[in-house]
Image: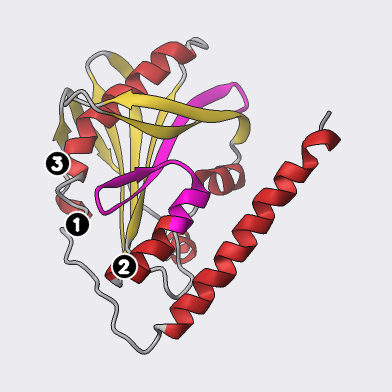
């Protein structure tokens, strides 16, 4: 069965390769022009209270991790809700430009390096406070007896994108139309207690719903 669908994986890599080559060629062609880099607010000013969530701990991103990510601004915090005993992690990485090859790293590549093994991946819909919904990646990881649900997405120009492929396409299009390639990755990690993934996913949605309105004021349109 896996062999029957192997051509799909090859097709995805072919599309991504063509896209990356087109992206490289376009960036090289515009290398002499000055990219428009919007002014953004420092992530250190991000609210310590979002909805019913309170900051429990200001995380520290180690220098070696910063050197790998190469983000222009980073935020890593633990937030706690009165309805959930264990703090959840909010991570934001902002990139002013992707023209030099620097780009948001997918958690699917980073988390295994931290000892977390992937279990299942897919997508989930999160209904926001205004009634609209966004689609984000849903990723279940485990390390020993610990299990967590990871939700993440790419954001730029008031746009939420779950797919890495779509994010690359939007980067190229934004570069052509607006002469800018800024983007951010937003990740929420909630531990699973008592093997209750449904409860953890509910908390993931709740934290995203609380965080999202503030994100819109930090990322330029």
Which type of secondary structure does the marked residue at label 1 adopt? loop
Mark number displayed over residue 84:
none
**Mark in the foreground, 3 or 2:** 2
Q: Which residue is pictured at 61% across the width and 40% down the height?
A: 115
Q: Horizontally, is 217 left or right of 111 in the view?
A: left
What residue is pinned by disc 2?
A: 177
Mark number displayed over residue 47:
3
Q: How is the image coloured?
A: secondary structure
Is residue 94 in view from this perspective? no
Q: Which residue is pictured at 62% across the width and 26% down the height?
A: 144
Q: Which residue is pictured at 39% across the width and 83% down the height?
A: 30
Residue 73, given in percent of the width and then of the height, sits at: 29, 60
Residue 67, given in percent of the width and then of the height, sits at: 45, 66
Q: Which residue is pictured at 16% across the width and 38% down the height?
A: 48
Residue 176, given in percent of the width and then of the height, sits at: 36, 70
What residue is pinned by disc 1?
A: 220
Segment colored magenta: 142-169
Q: Horizontally, is 123 left or right of 186 in the view?
A: right
Q: Quadrant of residue 190?
A: top left
């Amino acid at each position: 069965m896996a062999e029957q669908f192997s051509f799909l994986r090859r097709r995805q890599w072919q599309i991504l390769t063509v896209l990356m080559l087109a992206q490289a060629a376009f960036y090289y062609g515009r290398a002499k022009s000055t990219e428009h880099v919007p002014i953004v607010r420092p992530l250190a000013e991000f609210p310590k209270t979002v909805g019913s969530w309170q900051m429990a701990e200001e995380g520290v991103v180690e220098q070696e991790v910063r050197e790998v990510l190469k983000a222009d601004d980073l935020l890593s915090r633990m937030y706690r809700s009165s309805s959930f005993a264990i703090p959840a992690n909010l991570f934001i990485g902002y990139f002013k430009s992707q023209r030099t090859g620097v780009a948001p790293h997918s958690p699917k590549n980073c988390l295994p390096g931290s000892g977390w093994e992937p279990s299942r991946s897919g997508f989930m819909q999160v209904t926001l406070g205004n009634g609209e919904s966004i689609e984000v990646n849903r990723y279940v990881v485990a390390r020993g007896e610990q299990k967590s649900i990871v939700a993440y997405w790419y954001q730029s120009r008031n746009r939420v994108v779950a797919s890495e492929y779509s994010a690359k396409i939007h980067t190229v299009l934004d570069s052509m139309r607006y002469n800018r390639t800024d983007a951010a990755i937003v990740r929420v990690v909630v531990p699973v207690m008592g093997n209750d993934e449904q409860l953890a996913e509910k908390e993931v949605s709740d934290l995203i719903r609380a965080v999202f309105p503030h994100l819109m004021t930090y990322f330029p349109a």
